[in-house]
Amino acid sequence: MALFFVGGNWKCNGTKESIAKLVSELNSAKLESDVGCNSIYFLDVVVSPPFVYLDQVIGSISNGIEVSGQNSWIGKGGAFTGEISAEQLSDIGCKWVIHGHSERRHILGEANDFIGKKSAYALEKGLGVIACVGEKLEEREAGKTFDVVFEQLKAFAEAISGWDNVVIAYEPVWAIGTGKVATPQQAQEVHAAIRKWLTDNASTEVASKTRIIYGGSVNGANSSELAKQADIDGFLVGGASLKGAEFATIINSVT
Ligand code: PEP
């Protein structure tokens, strides 16, 4: 049984009006294997709007699509201006949260251990975590891809108490928002290495159950070749998730 996961990261985009239009496109999209589950596939589809539109999306989205926060605070809420707690995300109806996105690592300076702790707290509070890892171009060129990715995974592993409810998103930084997608072979090589890392550092069961999704310039034209790779269990999509029809094409390409 395949177990796919497709996430749409809307980042800091949209207005009330454009988001209403996108939700309505997604609600009426024909998703070939019913989102939720059917006898052949399990498929999770999750969208991640900006915080201020979460309530709007949660109140209007259907088609079995779940909603994720784009970040959450490291612990219980309180005097942390500008932050959103895992409890608040749950309270409003979010099922997931994204942690370790490269924009937060490299623009906002979030460190591995901080990200790991945030994920541990969110998991404890019942959210699923989309845990992002990935190397920068210079790290790939220096032959350090696996070192960087394994170090990021280790920080998650050291903080969390288990991999249930974690989806790992491999997102090479050089492919995010650049239009420069990893080739199916490049992505598969890292996905297979991540699965092996899970076997060695967690268990064979965790390695076979944990979904490892690819992100970085995925679109309706390149998703089906990527989806054919043995260790690619879905996608995290940025730009192309802002277009309902194209996001539906990507979702349907993994079935
Ligand atoms: C992302 O932000 O997670 C992402 C993969 O973006 P894009 O699809 O636009 O490269």
Image: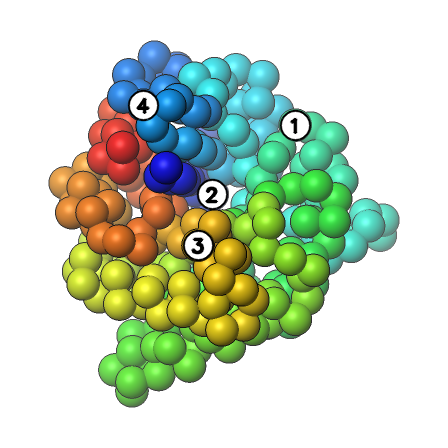
Q: Give whichever of discs 3 and 2 has the lower sequence position.
A: 2
- Marks 1 and 4, how far apart in space? 24 Å
Task: For residue 247, say whether it is visible.
Answer: no
Residue 250 — which label? none
Residue that numbered label 1 is attached to: 93
Cβ atoms at labels 3 and 1 below 8 Å apart: no
Locate residue 138 relative to residue 228 in the image: left or right: right
- The residue beneath circle 3 is 208
Label 2 CB sits under 8 Å from any ligand 1 atom: no
> Between 227 and 142, which is closer to the camera in this rendering?
227
Q: Earlier in the sequence, mark 1 or mark 4?
A: 4
Looking at the image, tell me whether mark 3 or mark 1 is earlier in sequence order.
1
Q: Residues within 10 Å of mark 4 (few under 14, many from 20)?
A: some
Residue 239: x, y in percent? 31, 43
Disc 4 from disc 3: Cα separation: 22 Å
Q: Amino acid at mark 3?
A: Ser
